[in-house]
Amino acid sequence: MAEPAYYLGVDIGTTSTKAVLFDKTGNIGASASIHYPLHTPSAQAAEQDPEVIFRAVLGTVRETMRKSAIDPASLKLVSFSSAIHSLIAVGAEGELLSQAITWADSRAAKHATRIKEELDGHAIYLRTGTPVHAMSPLAKIVWLKEDKAEIFGETAMFADIKSFIFHKFFGEFVVDHSIASSTGLFNFKNLDWDSGALEVAGIHAGQLPKLVPTTHQLKGLAADHAAFMGIPKDVPFIIGASDGALANIGLGAIGPGVAAVTIGTSGAVRTVSPMPKTDPKGRTFCYALTADHWIIGGAVNNGGIILRWLLDEFAAAEVETAKRLGTNPYDVLTKIASTVNPGSDGLIFHPYLTGERAPIWDSNARGSFFGLSIHHEKQHMIRAVIEGIVFNLYTVALAVEEVTGEPTLIKASGGFARSEMLRQLLADVFGQPVTVPESFEVPVSARPFSACMRSVKSTTSASPET
Amino acid sequence: MAEPAYYLGVDIGTTSTKAVLFDKTGNIGASASIHYPLHTPSAQAAEQDPEVIFRAVLGTVRETMRKSAIDPASLKLVSFSSAIHSLIAVGAEGELLSQAITWADSRAAKHATRIKEELDGHAIYLRTGTPVHAMSPLAKIVWLKEDKAEIFGETAMFADIKSFIFHKFFGEFVVDHSIASSTGLFNFKNLDWDSGALEVAGIHAGQLPKLVPTTHQLKGLAADHAAFMGIPKDVPFIIGASDGALANIGLGAIGPGVAAVTIGTSGAVRTVSPMPKTDPKGRTFCYALTADHWIIGGAVNNGGIILRWLLDEFAAAEVETAKRLGTNPYDVLTKIASTVNPGSDGLIFHPYLTGERAPIWDSNARGSFFGLSIHHEKQHMIRAVIEGIVFNLYTVALAVEEVTGEPTLIKASGGFARSEMLRQLLADVFGQPVTVPESFEVPVSARPFSACMRSVKSTTSASPET
């Protein structure tokens, strides 16, 4: 009998950290997750406490090992994914000078505009693959430099959340090419920090973590942390990549012509290209996965967060009733939407309630219902909102198509993909078959690279055109 | 003691006919009303049966006389008002060739466009005071000529509903200057049918009722009708004017600087000018009341009908609850709206759900919510809709102002004016004090001319600017 072997995937997200154990054939074993808050002391700020996230990483690994009761010696590796665009200012003694500033933080908005308009931001995008936007660490560093000079001046290391955690584990700041490629500071041609971007940021490469490939291994875990987590201190830690890039692997969306469409709170369209590519119009991102796998796509703000708004503002009474009947609130929305013709009888909804990233890159954009007639009822508005979310993502997909070619299959994930009606709508709008992963319980990015290739349960075809 | 004297006002509306008895000093006595349907066999058609309306006139007068139990000899006159823009095709033998085609009928839309664009419609407007639109009898006659040639060819008389009823009473077709001035066929300079408009319509003046002033009296009522109604057959019938023009009198909005703002199902802004005036931009109407009283104003489609839509689509559950508490549904809307700041925190609503007449004259216009952010809740949408209705009327008022000068007082009427919150909103948006009539039970246009001058109950001032 073969020696038992297990792999642990850890996904450091913006709402929680999740750890999942897999066996050799990719089957899911024990798992654990710990949620933490997003702090929004102002409408623009969106921060998290790095120490709290670090304790969540320790806690989820410990809990997963405890639940699984496997022999720790059979754990062959721990692999990581994390959200992109986070920035943490760290002092010379390793002390925190800032919280983890997340992608959703918009305090760098006017600095991003200035980089775009005055500092040749489009050329930086064409070299780095990261759209110039408040979300990017480049813009955040410029914000610190100009508005928080006391922090900027003291910062020895501009880390991301994963680098910060690896520094806790191994005493060094390392960042994988994937996370680095989403900072706006990483030149994807020479796989190094971009001198022009560093100049705009006003920093030198020594203030950024050491660059390593996504398959990079570290060993020699700090003994106290190893003991707490219940794992051997010589188990290899794979630095891994960004959650979005790994989601394409988890979904099996890495071949030519396959696009991953994710709608969680926000949303994204992502394809994999064998080489880095950017959009002359600046609409798409290009993030590294490996040297010959590049994620080309676009991320939107307005995904499930708009469904949540729709639920609260348009269907509170219906949801109240549905709850008593044991029905999922989102099923109420899709059932109401299903009573209306595709196209909502001419009613159009622009979903830009939180401003928008791709495809329009305008944080001042706002939403609208457009074309209202006296014949439109609440169910038309509900359907129009859902259609607006999907059409916005389709517009992103069209921009991605211009860069990478037309997809022939959509792999859908995120809460949105659980609904048959929404999967069908995706298939109809995109005009492509849609498949969904076999499990919604495990974040697809938490699966180690090798264990994720058979994860398709069902296929939804586009409706025949009539 | 003075001889008792009574006056009967009869208002022929598009939803009902109402009769009201007044005494010498304008006090209201008995009244009666009879509703009748609006037939909409297609989305464009909006017709009523003239015979049904005639029986409603007979019935309401009979019922009012019966209820009042006054001596019929003390009835000194019967005075009429009616809705404008109705058209009835009558054959040579007095037979009906069409139903009463109401203002809301839009089958003449493309003909109106053609008149405007190809047949110098703006010049016709400048001579007749009636905007060229599907609502106007001019456009309706062109529609009959071009799309219903068999009816057009047989028509001996193009009557309006009041002419039709007076023909039943007195055997002749007469139309007052007020109703005539809303046909698009009446030249307000020479107080006669306009030869250019007749040419466009393809008819001659003999196919239109005889023109008379609004104070014109007829005597010699058909004996059977007099007997049925319970009134002497020699009581004088005053032909009267349009409901809108008389509403200005009823509201006391006839002096300089006074504007009547009415929001019923639709809405209007109307002022009185001592001479006819038109708008070089074609936004306002100019309808006769007397030789030296001309109603300058604009009518909108989207008044209370949008509040009804708002109630149904945004507040059904709240209204259900409120009903159980004995609260008026519209009070629910205004209470919810009152929880939100003026301006709805930046959310804008265009109320053009049924297309629009003044101020934009575009039947293809549609409504929109504009500027939606994730912070906008249902109460913001409710307030934005109400504000949108009022701002649309204010835009009409600004157009009227360009023609007649700025008003200094608003006299409000219609269901909308019953709400304190809505009166305050009117006062704030218009920046003028707002007064309302003492009674909402009697249509202001049903009051004989002389009896309506003291009808102000309360004044709402604009909020102080802070």
Image (cartoon, coloured by chain):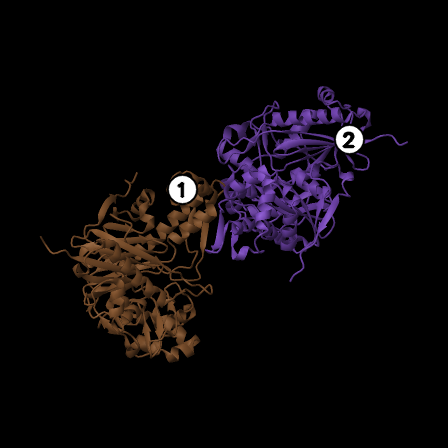
Chain colours: A brown, B purple
Circle 1 marks a residue in which chain? Answer: A
Q: Residues within 10 Å of mark 1 (few under 14, many from 20)?
A: some
Tell me residue B416's x, y (percent): 63, 44
Give the quadrant of the N terminus of chain B: top right
**Dot 2 and dot 1 residues touching (CB under 8 Å):** no
The residue wearing badge 1 is A332
Q: Is residue B464 above or below residue B298?
A: below
- C-alpha span from label 2 to label 1: 62 Å
User: Which one is in front, A407 or A171?
Assistant: A171
Q: Is residue B451 above or below residue A453?
A: above
Q: Residue at x 59, y 42 (%)?
A: B330
The residue wearing badge 2 is B77
Tell me residue A211's x, y (percent): 24, 72
Q: Quadrant of residue B461?
A: bottom right
Q: In the rendered view, does B52 fall on the left or right side of A133?
A: right
Tell me residue A138's x, y (percent): 34, 71
